[in-house]
Image (cartoon, rainbow, N blue to C red):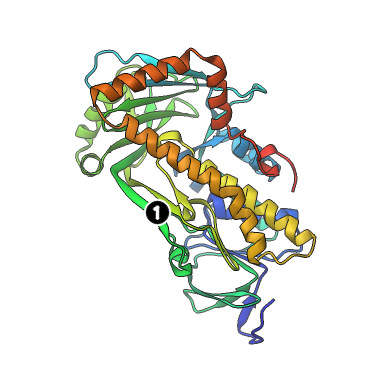
Amino acid sequence: MTDNPRADIERTDVLIAGGGYVGLSLALALASALPGLGVTLVDARPPQTDPAEAAKDLRASAIAAAARRMLGELGVWAEIEPAAQPILDMVITDSRLDDAVRPLFLTFDGRTDDGAPFAHMVPNAVMVGALARAAVAAGVRLIAPGSVVDFETGAGSTVARLADGRRIAASLLIAADGVRSRLRALSGIRTVSWSYGQSGIVTTIAHERPHEGRAEEHFLPAGPFATLPLTGNRSSLVWTEKTGVADKLVRGDEILFDVELERRLGLRFGRIEVVGPRVAYPLGLTLARDFVRPRFALVGDAAHGIHPIAGQGLNLGFRDVAALAETLVEALRIGRDPGSLDVLEEYQRWRRFDTAQMAVVTDVLNRLFSNDLAPVRLVRDIGLGLVDRLPGLKRAFIRQAAGDGADQPRLMRGERL
């Protein structure tokens, strides 16, 4: 596997840096499809595998139907499903904060053509814990806590150096270490990036009245304010504000936060209570100019970070996983080198257009809706109204949101690699 015969270098076939949902699902997909493959995953924190501890983490994400099919094929959806809340319908409004009435400009039935929900809200810790347990059972070697601090690529392998001094040689190093990827920077891959001057406030609320599986997104001048249904009478909030305002709301008095929250929510949920931590994340766009180098690949947020306005960041990462896993498995089955540039460029060609397209769409939507200019408001509200009156176009949007586009990898279709 490596030209260096020194015995102090450990060896594996594929080394993945980053143990979130992207890194774990990729490791599981590879190990499940090719049981003899050596797959090692390194992460700074041990994955949360205790269900009781996982229940304390209230963060959640929207899992599109295609990603749900992939999780089913990987054997973890049955464990996740009891904690998942299907999104049964969705409404969109466009208003100012102090408007007395927020008319519904766009409504969606949240089911795909086969009658299944187009998305589920899934607790992050439940999903990551299920993936971690399945990965270990499939033979993935987990090194956690640990981190890759440097690597050197040779003709036959990449040798990664860990923070504890260990070195691991692999045919392929995969960076799944987030939007501020250290390994991406070390590889020399440049990015296109900018800040929106916004932050997304994320928290969880409990409420008196049921949400009935409805997701709501209100386009306010500062940015979208979304309520996403969770199991029980609970909802996840994704609340976009200018960064300075968001920081004050998160760090400030709870009473002020509750007052501003009620201004945006109104009274439709009855009595509400914030039951999760208030966290603000700066929002921007980061798009890697390349996804691969010889014996090196980017997946998930390391390859692309987009605005959450369409709720597609996590699902883009899962599509990366499905495409890269299929590319590598097919290459290995016919004896090709998984770290060779010609193999990795097949993955890059598969994912580049979809990623760039989603980056452009979310950027345009955010710029279009995060302002209060009267002519722009008029145009966008007319556009939303027209879409609401065109059932065929609405169905196309649902199929896109469900991840049911053309040229989907097999795992996204629920098929075995």
How many numbered marks, from 0 up?
1
In the rendered image, the quadrant that contains the N terminus is bottom right
Q: Amino acid at mark 1?
A: Val
- The image quarter containing residue 380 is top left
Q: Residue at coordinates 60% horizontally, 33% vertically from top-left? A: 65
User: Residue placed at 48% from the left, 59% from the top?
Assistant: 177
Q: In the visual, does 199 lie left or right of 111?
A: left
For the point 33% across and 29% down, the residue is 369
Residue 275 visible here:
no
Name the one closer to the observer, 34 or 407. 407
Asked if one can make out residue 31 in the rendered structure from this viewpoint, the answer is yes
Q: Which residue is mark 1?
A: 192
| Whole-percent x, y for residue 245 in the image | 21, 39
* Residue reaching furthest to the bottom: 6
Near mark 1 (Cα within 10 A), the count class, few <14, some 14-19 or many ≥20, is: few
Residue 265 against residue 13 in the figure, above or below: above
